[in-house]
Amino acid sequence: MLRLSALKSILFFIFCGCLLAAYWGLFNRFLPKPPSQLARKNHTLILSDFTHKSGQISFSKDVKPILDTRCVACHAGEDAPCQLQLSSYDGLARGLSKQPVYDNYRLNAAPPSRLFLDETTTKDWRKQGFYPVLNEHAPFPEINLNRSVLAKSLHLKHINPQPVQGKLPDEIALNHDRSLQCANLEEFKDFQANHALWGMPYGLPALTENELETLLNWIQDGAKSDFKKELSASAQADIKKWEDFLNANTPKQQLTARYLYEHLYSGDLHIKGQANNEFYKLVRSKTPGGQAIEEIRSVRPFDAPNANPFYYRLRPIVSSIADKDHFVYELSDEKMVRLETLFLKPEYTVNQLPGYDQESAANPFKTFAELPAIARYQFLLDDAEFFFAGFVKGPVSMGNSALTVIRDQFWVAFIKPQSEFNAQTTQFLADNGQYLGLPASKGEVIGFAEWQKLADLQEQYVTNKDTFVNNVLLNQQPIDLNFIWNGDSHNDNALLTVFRHHDNASVTKGLLGKSPLTAWVVDYPLFERIHYLMVAGFNIYGSAAHQATTRLYMDLLRVEAENNFLKFVPANARTAIYDSWYQGIDFKMFSGFHAPTFSTSKEPAISYQTSDIKNEFFEKIQQQLEPDKQHADTINRCQQIPCLAANRSPEQQQTDTLMQELANLRGDQIKALPEVSLLRIKNASADQDSVYTLIRNKKLLNVSYVFAEKLQRQPEQDTLTVVPGFMGSYPNQFFTVSTEQLGDFISQLKLSKNNPDAERFYSQFAIRRTNPDFWQHYDWLNKKYISLQTLNSGILDLSRYENL
């Protein structure tokens, strides 16, 4: 009996042990894994000697400044690599995506993935295919670190530092159209094995140990955010005032508000008198003022809101400001009075508010037919630089294929509003609305046949416009300079300069640089169509057909703007000037698409004294402006030495004289310079250092082709524009010289026509990607930029910084 009882006891304990083991195995599946087990499974363990200071790291005070100065340089905006936007905590929490925003080959439009809009929770972003870069599993410190792609990317740089002199090795690919890896956590082990030098910051010096320690400590502690956007009582009062203005309920006010929204939504709005770093987006919301904003997720601003009622709201921008997509429209009491004067005080009636059907909504001449044309045009002219910035700094102007539609440098003037013909102009636009259709009216499936129909309508419109201008606006009189807007003698938006920098662009007030090859004269219908083609109607996530037809239609608008200018040129010179813009044997085969529409018979009533008609034309316009609105360019267009700017010290004037010499270089003499360079000239102290932007303007036979640009190049005719201060959001290179070295800088540049000479030039003056002091130079430039342009500056982007 004893033996049987003992055997039963043994069997019972074995059974209990097996049951307990099975239970423990099942239970253990759902327990958080200990760090040593989870962190090492399929992932490289981050081993560091950094001290873990638990709970002492603040996102807003400690982490965000590092992200802003080291990561936002590439990871901001819609062109951020892998869609990883590190300019806000929301972007960091969203993570990365393998789906590119810019894709010239997709057959169908992609679902939009705009931060703060298309999804608002991390869970929803995961459904959209975004991968985390922070740990989203068991919250142990070691797991937080070792399941973070961000931490692994920083650590990879730490254990595999890049060279500290010369050029980076070829294995660090830097071409902007390179294939991105976008490795997620599961792929990172293979990524590290294959790309040991691809740690972050990519292709740039590593973070300092203090910076790296701060980020890793924060990640170990769970990567929490303490950032809060708090608005002052004064700002909230101003917001309410503007939201009340935009949401007034009379038909005239509602139509005006829609017009304002469709033109301002893409910019950064600033309220005059409020903090210089506070900006807003104008959005449509399902909720009224005083409640949390529920932004309507439309692809285009004229898409149906699908909410009744909806409200226009000012949403505070919480991301750090990156210069590449930052252009500012300022709201003020004076601006509100101006808008009321333009749109609300004139006597007219809005009989019926327009709908949102695609065909009509994409055509502003149909949608806003009942708003006075003179009011619409004056609204655009008042802030012409802002609206051109929407075109040149917006999503459409990204990539070489998109930017081949414009020259590297051109000047812009505007037709003067003809207030005495307001009724006739408004009626003409209403009658010709059918000819002013744009590609967005056809949606994403537009093909060549639809585009050709739009091109035919454009040709008919230009014919009708010429008849209207000659018979009504000019009354059969010759055109003269009184037809050009002079800024009403106080507005400095009257003349603009646009620069193209290969695959991005910039715009500024005034006439910068030497007389360019081409010039535009823009009238109201042309200005409006540029905005609705390139800004309001462009879908960054659109199909290849949508992107291609947008590019092709812009060809037509560019030619129209150039032809407007040629109407001010003597008749016998027009054809020769036009032919100089469009050269090349291949072009002749396709000239039917770009046939000039200017008249070769009617002479302008302008007396030209020189053969440089273009330059003389713009000089005459400048003379009509007030002296302080002329933006005289004494560096690039100095007619005779000395040619010095006013209010400059002797030392500054000496520097200006050398910069004039630099600006006169061309062709092979500037071969060593990339598209956009920032030249820092050091003085006695860093606060007194000055900055110049060096812009290399490439000469092309024509700009009528999306591809094969190299076949159109004439590098021997390249020119250089030297701009005091900052121009361009994507610098390709920094150069640093002392005042005493400036002459030597110019001399060596002129001789740097081949690789050995260029190498010596770069070694002495360039701040290369391998320079250990790179970040100090970058920080100084960003701070200097903000000090010079408080509202209109942002963090410079380094994604196009070259490996010279």
Image (cartoon, rainbow, N blue to C red):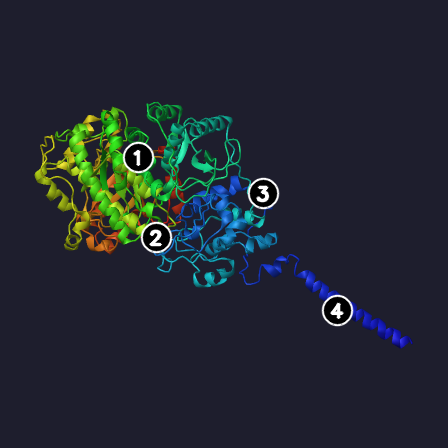
The alpha-carbon separation of the residues under discs 2 and 4 comes to: 65 Å
User: Which residue appears farthest toward the right when viewing the image?
Assistant: 1
Q: Which amino acid does label 3 sit on?
A: Gln
Q: Which amino acid does label 2 sit on?
A: Val
Report the side of 92 relative to 793 (left or right): right
Q: Which amino acid does label 4 sit on?
A: Cys
Q: Which of marks 3 and 1 is nearer the N terminus?
A: 3
Q: Which amino acid does label 1 sit on?
A: Glu
The alpha-carbon separation of the residues under discs 2 and 1 comes to: 32 Å
Q: Do the residues labelled 2 and 1 touch (CB within 8 Å)?
A: no
Where the N terminus falls, by quadrant? bottom right
Q: Position of residue 305 (x, y in %)?
A: 44, 40
The alpha-carbon separation of the residues under discs 2 and 3 comes to: 54 Å
Which residue is the site of mark 4?
Answer: 18
Q: Nearer the viewer, mark 3 or mark 4?
A: 4
Q: Nearer the viewer, mark 2 or mark 3?
A: 2
Q: Nearer the viewer, mark 3 or mark 1?
A: 1
Please name whichever residue, 300 or 450, is drawn nearer the observer in this view of the structure.
Answer: 450
Which residue is the site of mark 2?
Answer: 445
Query: Considering the numbered disc 1 on the image, is that residue within a helix, a strand or a loop?
Result: helix
Please name whichever residue, 400 or 523, is drawn nearer the observer in this view of the structure.
Answer: 523
